[in-house]
Image (cartoon, rainbow, N blue to C red):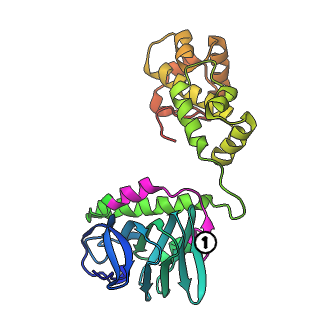
Amino acid sequence: MSVAPLSTIANPRVYSDVVARPTASEGTVMERFYPFRLRHIKEPTIPLPIACRSTGHYNALAGWHNPIKWPPFVQIFWGIRGKGKFVVSGQEYLLTPGHFFVLFSGQEHDITALTDWEYCWLTLDGLMPNEVVKGFGFGNEVILVGACPQELFERLFHEIEDISPEGQRTAGATAYEILSLALRREKDKPLPDSKYRVCIDLIKRKYANPDLNVASLAAELGLHRTSLSKMFRANMTMSPVEYLSLFRIGKAVKLLQGTDLPVNEVARRSGFSCPNYLTNVIKKRTGLTPRELRGMDPKLGTKGNTFIDSDTET
């Protein structure tokens, strides 16, 4: 079975798991491996700045080649494994793991897998896809952005099936989220290690232990405490100590406003070894004592609300 360029596939339906494989007798064929999905309608039915037209997760074998002429939509590519080459107006661009590449509507190009090559991709249309993507600062350059958010592409793979107005908005929002993640690029050096996420998970699970601190977190992650602090601050704009403290305060505030537990029990459950220290910290952060917080309607919030909501995903 010969491969049709993605831009020329007319029938908006789900395509089964496929991988591109070149053969001597038949040219390039597609074998079952990875899926892609097209929106079930040709154009968005509601006005959206960007709308998701299609998305996929490809694993192309070395030598696969896909010539595409002037597609009328924006294309986004995010490398996972191996190496592929784009040729755009005579200029070559290489996509490798952790790198991100944009093609704007109307740009003639072709794609070649230089090695076995895995990547995720999506295409965008809508009212102003070129303008929105350029507004993020992206152009025709390959940039280092870190690990591909495969879970978002997987989510988009399912969201694109829903062609209701709300479904189209949801898929567009996920595409926007993928673009936003690519803003974390650093062109001249690798991104900080993703272990900062593991550190956040550890804090969420172990915050109630008063002995939890940056040294114990670093030891559990196999890092020097200085390396952990630099990595965490680069990604969260605060140190792990600050995050832990704010998370504990957020937990304490919820317990004060949502239970009748005495302050010493609130302190214990929030990871504060001393109730007086909890009182002082809350007063400093919120301007209120625990007793005053307990008498407030939680929906009103606090003045200068500077703690981390312990029920919020980060």
Q: Which residue is at the front of the view, 151 or 278?
A: 151
Q: Residue at x 68, y 29 (%)?
A: 214
Q: Residue drawn at (31%, 64%), measured in percent from left and top?
A: 160
The residue located at (60%, 61%) in the rendering is 145
Q: Residues within 10 Å of mark 1 (few under 14, many from 20)?
A: some
Q: Nearer the viewer, residue 39 or 30?
A: 30
Q: Is residue 202 above or below residue 150?
A: above
Q: Which residue is mark 1?
A: 142
Question: Which quadrant would the N terminus be assigned to in this image?
Answer: bottom left
Q: Position of residue 101 (x, y in %)?
A: 55, 71
What's the residue type where badge 1 is placed? Val
Q: Nearer the viewer, residue 22 or 109?
A: 22
The residue stretch that appears in magenta: 135-157
The image quarter containing residue 289 is top right
Q: Would residue 295 be seen by someone viewing this image from the given angle? A: no
Q: Residue at x 58, y 57 (%)?
A: 146
